[in-house]
Amino acid sequence: MSTKIDRREDVNPEAGLHEYGDVEFADSTNHKYPIDSPEHVRAAWSYINQKDNAAKYDADEVKTIKNRIKQAAKKHGVEISED
């Protein structure tokens, strides 16, 4: 799960830090999909499973993001549906 996520041109990584603070993100390069709380884990899972959002990444990056969200779900005791 060490797939590197590329910097996206359509995202300002500072915006994620400004909005959520210094938290863990499923996409730590672009500071997208915070996974620091049960609510954020649920939201991250919902968003990455939307076609428009997933289309902004290549398949390996989506897999990495989903795996990070799944790990955070276990950590926070959140049940999420499989893809």
Image: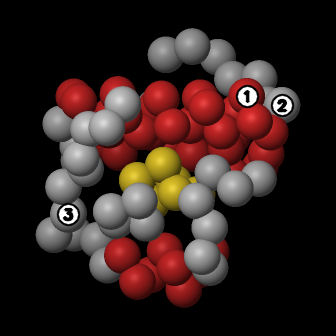
Give the left or right position of residue 38, taking residue 51 as reference. right
Is residue 83 depicted above or below 46 in this figure? Answer: above
| Dot 3: element | loop
Query: Which amino acid type corresponds to the residue marked 1 in the rendered image?
Result: Lys
| Dot 1: element | helix
Residue at the farthest right position: 77
Count residues near mark 3 (Cα–Cα under 10 Å), then give few for <14, some for 14-19, many for 20+.
some
In this rendered view, identify the residue nearer to me: 80 or 70: 70
Query: Which amino acid type corresponds to the residue marked 2 in the rendered image?
Result: Gly
Count residues near mark 2 (Cα–Cα under 10 Å), then give few for <14, some for 14-19, many for 20+.
few
Q: If you read the primary sequence from the N terminus, does the residue marked by circle 2 or circle 3 appear first? A: 3
Percent from the top left, x then y, of residue 13? 36, 76
* Disc 3: which residue: 7
Residue at point 59%, 29% (across, down): 70
Give the left or right position of residue 71, taking residue 67 as reference. right
User: Pointers 2 and 1 in contact (CB under 8 A)?
Assistant: yes
Q: How far apart are the alpha carbons under marks 2 and 1?
A: 5 Å
* Disc 2: which residue: 77
Q: Which mark is residue 74?
A: 1
* The N terminus lies in quadrant: top left
Query: Which amino acid type corresponds to the residue marked 3 in the rendered image?
Result: Arg
- How many numbered circles does the render carry? 3
Count residues near mark 1 (Cα–Cα under 10 Å), then give few for <14, some for 14-19, many for 20+.
few
Percent from the top left, x then y, of residue 12? 32, 78
Residue at point 41%, 59% (across, down): 28
Q: If you read the primary sequence from the N terminus, does the residue marked by circle 3 or circle 1 appear first? A: 3
